[in-house]
Image (cartoon, helix red, strand yellow):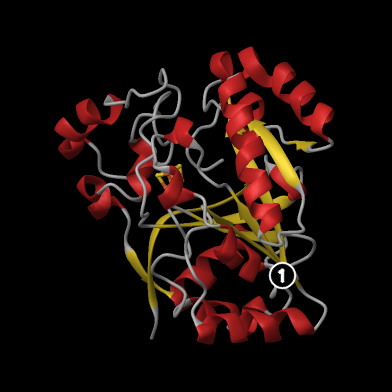
Amino acid sequence: MSKIKVAELFYSIQGEGKYQGVPSVFLRTFGCNFKCAGFGMPRGELSDEVEDIAQVVHMYNEYKELPLVSTGCDSYASWDPRFKHLSPLLSTESIVGSIMGLLPNKTWVDEHLVITGGEPLLGWQRQYPDLLDHPDMTGLKEITFETNGTQQLTPEFREYLHNWNKVGREITFSVSAKLPTSGEKWEDAIKPEIVCTYEEVGTAYLKFVVATEQDIADAECAAGAYRKAGFTGYVYLMPVGGVESVYTLNAKNVALAAMKRGWRYSDRLQVPLFRNAWGT
Ligand code: SF4
């Protein structure tokens, strides 16, 4: 039986991107190829906020007890090996059981499944078919993979998604491509040819997290590279910030910048609604 290392599994409202406002089950898998320690920091500097938490990791028994951070990756415990023990390896059978328990009607109505991370396409592509083919998952009509857009789909998973899509169901790739503000290198993070292959099996859109004019210029440059490679999906700009004080500082300017370019603006509804707490 397939197993997936699960950092979080919860029911909430999708706060970002195309499905904003849609009731959604979030499956946050463990593991990522990036660190994104630059978020919320002056350009060129990396956050070490998580170091203090790692020093006292023994104080925490569950993922949801961990402190939130305002700089660096806000999902740090979903990939940092020092927090690995807080993400259990669960059978797909037990994950489906938990998902059904989260759905308010104990069956799929209009809910959407978001497979997020970490980087959900990094290590678990072989396991997802077992999860999605479970009899209790037949009512599911829409999935989004929230990805950083650097992972190739395996030929087997690509074929699987192609067939899943054929019967009136929708697959979306919400591609949060990492700009230099993340602290990751451009050549590692901007992979247009890979993202174009996602469009062969579903809908894909780009979602750039920005705070400054320089970030917006970077987003423009990256969007140009994706377009040049043949990418046809929407482009979103989203303000940086996992805490409201940071987020409200730049939201309006980000919206104006999106409008100016004919791009879409994405809010982060989970911040004002739920203060970006775990499980939201
Ligand atoms: S790609 Fe996403 S999950 Fe991975 S380190 Fe960056 S922000 Fe965190």
Residue 87: quarter of image: bottom left
Name the quadrant of the C terminus. Answer: top right
Q: Looking at the picture, does residue 240 appear above or below residue 25?
A: above
The structure residue drawn at horizontal position 25% and vertical position 46%, both measured from the top left corner, is 83
Q: Position of residue 139 (x, y in %)?
A: 74, 75
Q: x, y percentage for residue 145?
A: 59, 60
Nearest the viewer among 260 and 59 is 260
Q: Is residue 114 left or right of residue 254?
A: left
Q: From the Cβ of disc 1, is ligand 1 less than 8 Å away?
A: no
> Is residue 239 in view?
no
Splitting the image into four quadrants, where does ligand 1 fall?
Answer: top left
Q: Quadrant of the N terminus?
A: bottom left
Q: Is residue 38 left or right of residue 276?
A: left
Drawn side of residue 8 relative to residue 26, left or right: left
Taking depth in this image into account, of 216 and 73 the one nearest to the observer is: 216
Q: Residues within 10 Å of mark 1 (few under 14, many from 20)?
A: some
Q: Residue at x 62, y 12 (%)?
A: 249
Is residue 127 visible in the rendered image? The answer is yes
Give the residue number, with chain letter if any, for mark 1: 202
Residue located 57% across and 23% down the image: 214
Residue 34's place in the image compared with 272, above or below, is below
* SS at badge 1: loop
Q: Position of residue 219 (x, y in %)?
A: 62, 36
On the image, the x and y values in percent for residue 157 come to 54, 81
Instruction: Give the quadrant of residue 137.
Output: bottom right
Name, please, the residue furthest toward the front: 228
Relative height, residue 256 to residue 237 (above, below): above
